[in-house]
Image (spheres, helix red, strand yellow):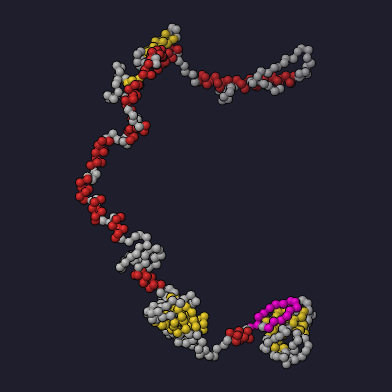
Amino acid sequence: MATNFPTSLDNLTNPAGSDPVNNPSHASQHANLNDAIEKLEEKVGVNNSAVTTSLDYRVRQLETNPVAGYTDEEARNAIGTALTGSGGITVTPNNVANTITVSTDSTIATKTYVDTAVSNLGNTSATLYVPVSEVGNADGIATLDANAQIPLSQLGNLVDGAPLALDTLNELAAAINDDASYAATITTALGNKLDSTTAASTYLTQTNASTTYLTQTNASTTYAPLASPALTGIPTAPTAAVGTDSTQVATTAFVIDQIDASTQPGALYQTTAPTSPEIGQIWIDSDENVTTFDSNIIRRKAITATAGQTVFTADLPFIDGFEQIFMNGLLLVKTTDYTTSNSNTVTLTSAAAASDIIEIVSVTGANSVNTYTQAEVDALLAANTSVAPLSISANTTLVAKKRYFVTSASALTLTLPASPALNDEIQIVDASGNASTYNITVARNGNKINGGTGNLIIDNNGGWYTLLYTGTTYGWKVG
């Protein structure tokens, strides 16, 4: 059976004499008995049991480690020693009655003593006096009473109308920076100050300043105003560094330095680039190193101007719009700074100053022989351009100067140009090699082919045909 011991007691039922032998069975009764005995043995434990919950283990622990204790007299003596250690307390033990009587001397105030003293104070001192411990000694400012205390009526003498920010000792101390030696500090500071006699004889005073130095009165009558001054004579000013960009006054020296730094050098005409070019310098690659390039193409004319000169003339005519005009190395802007006329004349918008250098760099129109026009050059390029390849697989109108690679898997028609030019060339290649199955028809489009009026049929696999237009008589010649 399932036993409840040791959590709770088991209820074992003994069989009656009238019970059948087999109910409960003999085996069941033995099993129940065995279960109960096993639980008892488990609770009691074997000798020297290590099971901490067994009785054997716990009894052995008590025998081995007995708990120390104190007798009543030892306890009383310990309490008495603790209470009397600091003095002022007397302890009287009674070993018969097991009691302790505690008494105090005058060093320690008992609760009864304190309560009585507080009660005797009443309300008089609280309303009429401030404790001396809080206000310190009066030092003659307030009158003490017979008990050496300051009456409340005397406190007003301490304040005596002081401002709110200085009516406490703490505020007064803060005002002098909590300096216990404030008087000495002030005396030392005053000793370091300049006395009036030395100041009057050594330093500027109002009197000598008005007679010797600039004042509002003499400034208004002697010096120019700050706003829009009208200066006379030769005024001077600091010269700013080259490149300064501010509202600082520009002196003549600054202007000259700035112009020198900004002047662009003249153009160079030579076969190689300058080894140390200056900023803004122009280099024109020429056939030889010369001061002026081929006069039949580009010419540079430098003219030294006279005062007020505006009109300058080049030696040879130039192509209008292809000139560059420089003044002292600075490139001028057409229309804004100058105009041109007669293909050789430059007129400045603002007159030049004496010794200004005017340079006219121009493309001339004189003696230009054995040259092609742009149209002629374009025609030559077109006539000598290699045939460009192009892959096609559908009906196409052909264009001169093309090589057509036919890759079609079906028959198609290629139409020649309607208005070919002399020497136009077209190439047709059966790139897919299917022309015998899928014929390629070359439509003549109104022009003859090999002098005839029939179209060209390409029907041999892999054929390569070149058509060259020779004119209206024979038309396209096939090769």
> How many marks do you count on the picture?
0
Image position, residue 456 (x, y; %):
76, 86
Question: Which one is nearer the viewer's eye here, 126 or 293?
Answer: 126
Asked if residue 466 can be seen in this view, the reply is no
Residue 139's image quarter? top left
Residue drawn at (30%, 60%), measured in percent from left and top? 223
Q: Is residue 188 left or right of residue 472?
A: left
Question: Which one is nearer the viewer's eye here, 4 or 296?
Answer: 296
Residue 185's image quarter? top left
Q: Is residue 399 magenta?
A: yes
- In the image, the segment drawn in magenta is 386-400
Residue drawn at (39%, 78%), measured in percent from left and top? 353
Look at the image and tell me in which quarter the C terminus lies.
Answer: bottom right
Image position, residue 473 (x, y; %):
73, 92
Residue drawn at (68%, 83%), measured in percent from left and top? 400
Image position, residue 375 (x, y; %):
60, 85
Look at the image and tell me in which quarter the N terminus lies.
Answer: top right
Image position, residue 294 (x, y; %):
47, 86
